[in-house]
Image (cartoon, grey):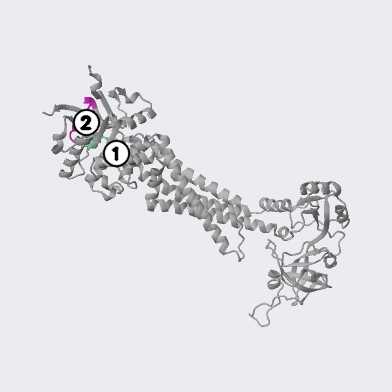
Amino acid sequence: MNFVAIKMLVGDRARYLGILMGLTFASLLITQQASIFEGLMARTYGFITDTGLPDIWVMDKKVLMIEDIKPLQDTMLYRVRGVEGVDWAMPLYKGLLKARLDNGSFQTCHVIGLDDATLVGGPGTMVEGRLEDLRRADSVIVDIVGAEGKLARPAEKAGGDKIPIKVGDTLELNDHRAIVVGICRTTRTFQSQPVIYTTYSRATLFAPQERKLLSFVLVKAKAGENQAEVCRRIEAATGLAAYTQQGFKDLTYDYFMKYTGIPINFGIAVLLGFIVGTAIAGQTFFNFTVDNIKYFAALKAMGARDSQLLGMILLQAMIVGAIGWGIGVGAASLFGFLLRDTELSFLLTWKLLVISGCAIMVICTLSALLSIRTVMRAEPAIVFKG
Amino acid sequence: MVETATEIAVSCAGVTKAYGSGQARVTALRGIDLEVRQGELLMLVGPSGCGKTTLISVIAGILDHDDGECRVFGEDLKAMSGSRRTRFRGDNIGFVFQQFNLIPTLTIAENVAVPLLIAGVSRREAVGRGRDLLNRVAIGDRWTALPSKLSGGQQQRVAIARALVHNPRLIVCDEPTSSLDHETGHKVMELMREVAAGDGRSLVVVTHDSRIFEFADRIARMDDGRIVSVTEKA
Ligand SMILES: Nc1ncnc2c1ncn2[C@@H]1O[C@H](COP(=O)(O)OP(=O)(O)OP(=O)(O)O)[C@@H](O)[C@H]1O
Ligand SMILES: [Mg+2]
């Protein structure tokens, strides 16, 4: 009976395409919105992604996420270095400092201070200059978005383009002179401030005098060591919190999930896709069944068991579901691919594929149930009615 | 060999049926006594609304009657469970409808194969046997056509082939010729007699069309929910 079910479905072109369109739309909307959401959420831990080298991040126990800086005493660095299984441990400064622009206005910047000797934790991509140039006096590296945007100099004539900061330009950070030696590219984060990389010692010089300046200790575990185990040892030895890179990303992700309205807003869009998809697909599928009710009734009269009819309808629902899901996911991927070089955040993970697949399956099951009910209730005696 | 009970395919005694309830209640059958013999073609005739369709629905086991008894090949269908009755229909009864009820997206050979597919026969074998039957109703050469490509008479031939393909013992037909012109209807009835009748198979044919009465073994006349007369054809 399977091929009868398939031919009934596919042969009815208009209806078939209608159902597919509904499901494709739902699949597309759900996958696309969820991917944008995931992309945005990945921005929350973009800085951790950029700082790819260390395995483990060590910080104050009360730190809630990457932007939540609770400085440590400098001596903590040496205590972490003493823990068994630690290959190396480097300091990282991360803080907000005011930069004075040429026109006299101030711009708050994210200043990242890297270990003076190794420069561990530097930006992923250099657009201009080299990371090693940070070893020169007063040097800083500015991210390209900041350089072309908030840190750019005003246009020479009114209405003209702003002049981006270039290598060789100078900035003033807390009354200290800084020379731009490079331009880098960083992963987008939720922070709109320009990012400025420099060395740890220079960053502490720029920073207002405070007792504690060490934001994070970045740790590489020895080869073959279990990272979770090393984290536990560091925590035991120092009383600090230590997370694997993924663990720290998760902590940050969870923080944004819990304490911001982002998930709800995207949840609404995803839900909308789900509802609209269910409405269109469910409605057309139901109409399809109702239109075919006399054939289903004839099958019943000719001895088809309820289970056979149920199987036919489920098969039909699964077919349109699988195809609609596939096209929708494909279209969402294409959307993400075509806009890959834009500001759009888009991250399509396999988890999202599973989620959208499940959503489509729920839609199809609901539609099928509605149809099945109608078919089960149909009196076979209607076969003799004109 | 004494064959009395087995010669009767269907026996109805005092069968009543009413639709709806209260004000809207319509009594369709008011006590039907009727026997259908094995191997005969019985025609059921009468004015519109007299209950012909209701009666063959009861006989075919797709509608429950209210009172009285209706036995088909000795079985009381009303007493059967739903799934046993469905199975019984699949094994024993063939249907021919006024509107043919062929599935429009299946080829005619596949349409003919449907009762076999329902019974669990493989697609290959079922469609093969569907083609054989189409040969017997003389449209075997068009077995890959869709129903919509055929004339009404040809479609009714397909429907007859479908009613026969699983070799049922009883075939019920509701107005099989009323959507066909006279000549085509005549040919369809000839086919019914030649191909469908015989092998001890019984046919119950509901019709308005007095021009096909000549094909009946017996004619049962109905009026207002009752059988008013049964005449043997000479
Ligand atoms: N499902 C139903 N609900 C309510 N009343 C019905 C239903 N089916 C039939 N009836 C009524 O029962 C009576 C008998 O109907 P039936 O269809 O058996 O007549 P018929 O002899 O086949 O008529 P026709 O020659 O017009 O096909 C009619 O009065 C009809 O209106
Ligand atoms: Mg009728």
- SS category of the residue bearing label 1: helix
Amino acid on which the number 1 mark rests in the picture = Arg
Query: Which residue does the numbered mark 1 point to in the structure image?
Result: B162
Numbered disc total? 2
Q: Quadrant of the C terminus of chain A?
A: top left
Calculate the distance from the C-alpha at mark 1 to the C-alpha at mark 2: 17 Å
Residue A131, compared with residue B224, is above or below; it is below
Q: Quarter of the picture for ligand 2? A: top left
Examine the image and state in which quarter residue A290 appears. top left
Relative image position of residue B224 (x, y in whole percent): 20, 30
Callout 1 crowding tier (Cα within 10 Å): few <14, some 14–19, many ≥20: many
Query: Which residue does the numbered mark 2 point to in the structure image?
Result: B198
Left or right placement of residue A116 versus residue A381 in this view: right
Query: Which residues lie in the magenta part?
Result: B30-50
Assess whether residue B40 is covered by the magenta stretch.
yes
Marks 1, 2: nearer the viewer? 2
Amino acid on which the number 2 mark rests in the picture = Gly
